Amino acid sequence: QVQLVQSGAEVKKPGASVKVSCKASGYTFTSYGISWVRQAPGQGLEWMGWISAYNGNTNYAQKLQGRVTMTTDTSTSTAYMELRSLRSDDTAVYYCARLVVVVAATPPYYYYYMDVWGKGTTVTVSS
Amino acid sequence: QTVVTQEPSFSVSPGGTVTLTCGLSSGSVSTSYYPSWYQQTPGQAPRTLIYSTNTRSSGVPDRFSGSILGNKAALTITGAQADDESDYYCVLYMGSGILVFGGGTKLTVL
């Protein structure tokens, strides 16, 4: 079955970086993208961006531009999300999700949705 | 910056019907935003319910349905059950590869 297995919890100091992994199984990795979503304690879900596992193209949320990098390793069907210059408000559960890209007949000609989710990785930023 | 709006909370009686909505701070939601809906219970990962306005994800019961109502996307739960008590999030596709979550609706079944 389709599964996304995420790496374990992390504790980081302010200013450090964190790299979370998401290993996919049960489907052809390069036929989909991977989206990253985070949730701060007691807050809602926040879309961070996505990466195409087919060609490595990325699209990041504007507020994270310059601090986030998403990559994939197709040899191991693993996606990575690195967040730099960590602040206390980056404390959150980070989820990866399989991103489905659909061709549409009318503008915008493509659309995206997330269909399978990892269980989440807790990242705590604290001095 | 456009904000995706949802009711902060809603309640429904067991067996009842409830409609949650997803709007825009400026403008109307249409099918061109390809709204999707996600359910999340506390401490769990989200679960995909609906995509492309009204297509149910695999394994989702037909008690859940999506639509456009007026100028908003809508998620309707018919015959609400106790385990439908969750947070519900909509996502809109803003074009250029950008997705935006709504703030979520906390649904209580009582």
Image: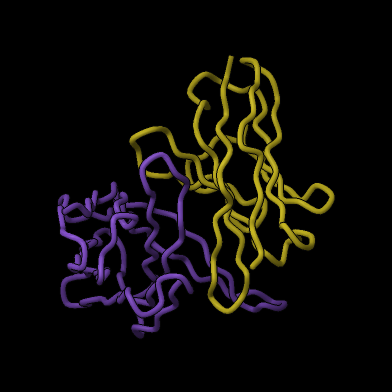
Chain colours: A purple, B yellow
Q: How many numbered tags mark residues here? A: 0
Front position in the image: A55 or B71:
B71
For the question of whether residue A2 can be seen, the reply is no
Residue sitting at 32 percent across and 73 percent down? A68
Where does residue A59 sit, x and y in percent of width and height? 44, 77
Counting from the top left corner in percent of width and height, residue B30 is at 76, 61
The answer to which image quadrant residue A82 occupies is bottom left
- Quarter of the picture containing the C terminus of chain A is bottom left
Q: Position of residue B77 (x, y in %)?
A: 65, 32
Using the image as rendered, state which of residue B22 and residue A66 is in the foreground: A66
Left or right, A116 with reference to A80: right
Q: Residue at (55%, 20%) from the top-left corner?
A: B81
Q: What residue is drawn where x is 61% and y is 15%?
A: B14
Asked where in the image residue A27 lies, by quadrant, the reply is bottom left
Q: Is residue B65 visible?
A: yes
Where does residue B25 sit, x and y in percent of width and height? 72, 57
- Residue displayed at 79% across by 63% down: B27
Between residue A34 and residue B72, name the one nearer to us.
Answer: B72
What is the residue that sits farthest to the right in this orientation? Answer: B70
